[in-house]
Image (tube, rainbow, N blue to C red):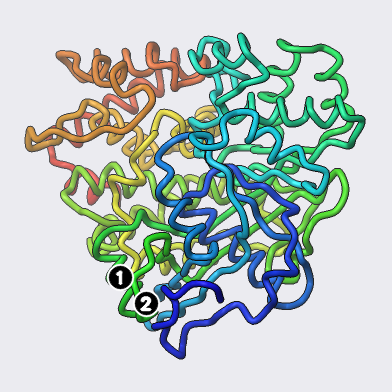
Amino acid sequence: MTSDLFNAAKDTVKRPAYDRDKLTVRMCHIGFGAFHRAHQAVYTDQLIGMGKTDWAYREIELMGPTALLDGLAERGYLYTVVENGAEAQDARIVGSVIDHRHMANAGPEGIIAAISEDAIELVSITVTEKGYTLAANGGLDFENPMVKADLANPEAPRTVVGTLVAGLARRKAEGKKPFTILSCDNLPSNGHMTRRAVLDFARAVDADLAAWIEREARFPSTMVDRIVPAMTEESHQVLADCAGYADPAGIVCEPFRQWVIEDDFVSGRPDWNLAGATFTGDVLPYENMKLRMLNGSHSFLAYLGYLGGYETIADTMGDAAYKKAAHDLMVKEQAPTLEAPEGVDLADYADALIGRYCNPNIRHRTWQIAMDGSQKLPQRALESIAHHLKAGTPYPRLALLVAGWMIYVSGIDLSGQPIDVRDPLADRLKTLASGDSAEAIVNDLMQKSGVFPEELATSAPLQAALIEAYLSIREKGVKAAVASLA
């Protein structure tokens, strides 16, 4: 312990019992957001505490304010995580972070040097979908202005992908092995997706570099799960009450956590399985299960719950019709599209998710989950809809989810009040969602938004289903539309 901030910690707060001076920066992490603090860093902290690794994190930020990391450094890189269960709380001070770099202070060269040092074996990432600068086809978006700027000056990159390529190029030029790149974002086949974007950028810069990365580097896929709401004044107070002090970098999250990792690394890696993670040869079944059942039902509750006037997921679950619809969505419409991971019962998984959603002490705002829907909708709903269209099976709850999204992105709720839509395509979506009829709105969003894959964008059966769902919300009201699903 190296910070006076934690002197007031209650006796119940778990503290690092290990010698942090003996830790070594072996991993860099890009994106020091709430999820990373509550997830990967906690697994690592627990593993260090077991005496099973001396690997620690250097945190990397490429944009945004510097205050969070600067303040963290002043507090010896210690911060607090409170697991806020329905019946009990548990607080721990996390010590697995020991260094940082911020683009605003270090500049591109400082960031490249930080991730390409000899000791770095692994660079992990949590930057949300938009941080990967992807095009609709899943590859790198060469029309993105930031990508264009990086390609014009690849030795001074500012995007995630450009930075990774520059770090790998430094390793290659020095005759060293690459580092492993570990995406921990909620994206389908996130390792394959990251690999494709990195190779797209590298090929545009240096064909030999791209060939070396393709041959030598590793991009394991992961599935991550923990509900980590954005911090609010209320949750900061929860933390202070539980721990005995205020912590600007602290996090309040649910007790549950899960991490499934494809065991494919360039060289070493921590044995996170000893702290509860799962190493596997195939992450895809876990990933699809989580994206469709958890994230898909979350989006259902987010759009339709927000339109129904519910602030949080727990509030929404207090409505019996929403609770039943979310469960039925998982069991009747998402589970049939999945190959269950070995040893997992999808019905039991759905029941467990409902229990997690009902936790009144996790204030996960529907508005927060609704962010960046254009990036999330394909894997959370549209892939499942494609399955049902091919199989000829019904999907009324998925259709209502998508229709709710279509109303939400118009920027005007059912009472005529403005919605603060946060989405990379917000302006385009708002224009497309402002037509003069349900038919026009559904048609335009399907065919002109870039969100729907081609086979769905022109599907007459899907268009009819979405128009019916859209009109159901508009004419009955969203709560009645959800109740009618029973």
The residue depicted at 57 percent of the width and 11 percent of the height is 142
193 w.r.t. 398: above or below: above
The N terminus is located in which quarter?
A: bottom right
Residue 305 at x, y percent in the picture = 25, 49
Considering only vertical position in the picture, is 149 above or below 158? Answer: above
Percent x, y of residue 237: 27, 70
Tag 2–tag 1 contact (CB < 8 Å): yes
What kind of element bears circle 2? loop
Q: Is residue 337 visible?
A: no
On the rendered structure, is 166 left or right of 128?
Answer: right
User: Callout 2 environment at 10 Å: few (<14), some (14 to 19), or many (20+)?
Assistant: some
Q: Residue at x 41, y 87 (%)?
A: 10
Residue designated by label 1 = 360
Image quarter for residue 123? Answer: top right
Q: Residue flagged by tag 1: what amino acid is it?
A: Pro
Q: Compared with residue 353, is residue 432 higher up or lower down, i.e. above or below? A: above
Q: Nearer the viewer, residue 300 or 262?
A: 262
Which dot marks residue 86? Answer: 2
Q: CA distance from mark 2 to mark 1?
A: 6 Å
Disc sitting over residue 61 in the figure: none
Answer whether residue 296 is visible to the viewer in this image. yes
Apparent side of residue 21 relative to residue 176 in the rendered image (left or right): left
Q: Residue at x 60, y 37 (%)?
A: 188
| Sequence-first disc among 2 and 1 | 2
The residue most toward the bottom is 11
Q: Position of residue 264 (x, y in %)?
A: 83, 46
Q: Of the residues shown, which amino acid type is indicated by label 2?
A: Ala
Q: Secondary structure at mark 1?
A: loop
Q: Nearer the viewer, residue 240 or 458?
A: 240
Image quadrant assignment for residue 183: top right
Report x, y in % for residue 480: 17, 47
Which residue corresponds to the image point at 54% horizontal and 54% vertical from the top-left?
36
